[in-house]
Image (cartoon, rainbow, N blue to C red):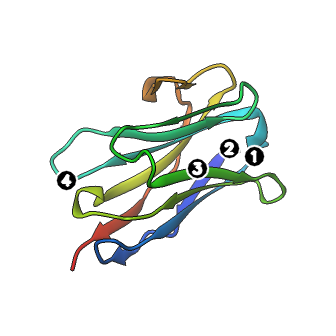
């Protein structure tokens, strides 16, 4: 059974950092595109970052470029989202999702409709 579980969400002050984890079971993540998305209160879901190891593509939304980093630990079958210089606008529930290699994650976008499996989300709140 395919499952994605996010963790690491927290309450942090502006300028702080958080590392989110997305642990997978039921499949080997290295062969799939993994995306991070977020949904802020009252807003639509937004693509944050994605990584497709097979096609060597990594994408970051302009709003997080230079502050967020996506990486993987193949041995742990886990993908991380390292978030630095957090601001109140980063407050949201963050989700990870997986897509077959060749789908979902592109150099200029991450298409949520192409992701097949989603985690339940983890809350990040940035507030003083």
How far is mark 2 from mark 4, CA to CA?
Answer: 28 Å
Observer-side mark, 2 or 4, equals: 4
The residue beneath circle 4 is 41
- Labelled pair 2, 1 in contact (Cβ < 8 Å): yes
The residue beneath circle 2 is 2
* Rendering quarter of residue 109: top left
Observer-side mark, 2 or 3, equals: 3
Which is more toward the observer, 90 or 121? 90
Earlier in the chain: of badge 1 and badge 3, it is 1
How far is mark 4 from mark 3, CA to CA?
Answer: 23 Å
Secondary structure under the numbered disc 3 in the rendered image: strand
The residue beneath circle 1 is 26
How far is mark 4 from mark 1, CA to CA?
Answer: 31 Å
Secondary structure under the numbered disc 1 in the rendered image: loop
Residue at 66% of width from left, 19% of height from top? 102
Residue at 73% of width from left, 42% of height from top? 29
Q: Is residue 127 left or right of residue 104?
A: left
Secondary structure under the numbered disc 4 in the rendered image: loop
The residue beneath circle 3 is 70
Earlier in the chain: of badge 2 and badge 4, it is 2
How far is mark 2 from mark 1, CA to CA?
Answer: 4 Å
- Residue at the extreme left: 42
Observer-side mark, 1 or 3, equals: 3
Above or below 10: residue 115: above
């Amino acid at each position: 059974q395919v499952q994605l579980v996010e963790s690491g969400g927290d309450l942090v002050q502006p300028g702080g950092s958080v590392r989110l984890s997305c642990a997978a079971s039921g499949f080997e993540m290295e062969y799939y595109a993994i995306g991070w998305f977020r949904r802020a209160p009252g807003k639509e879901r937004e693509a944050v970052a994605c990584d497709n190891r097979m096609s060597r593509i990594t994408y970051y939304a302009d709003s997080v470029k230079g502050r967020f980093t996506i990486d993987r630990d193949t041995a742990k079958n886990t993908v991380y989202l390292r978030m630095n210089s957090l601001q109140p606008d980063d407050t949201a529930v963050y989700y990870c999702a997986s897509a077959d290699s060749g789908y979902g994650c592109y150099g200029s976008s991450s298409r949520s409709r192409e992701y097949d499996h989603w985690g339940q989300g983890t809350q990040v709140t940035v507030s003083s």
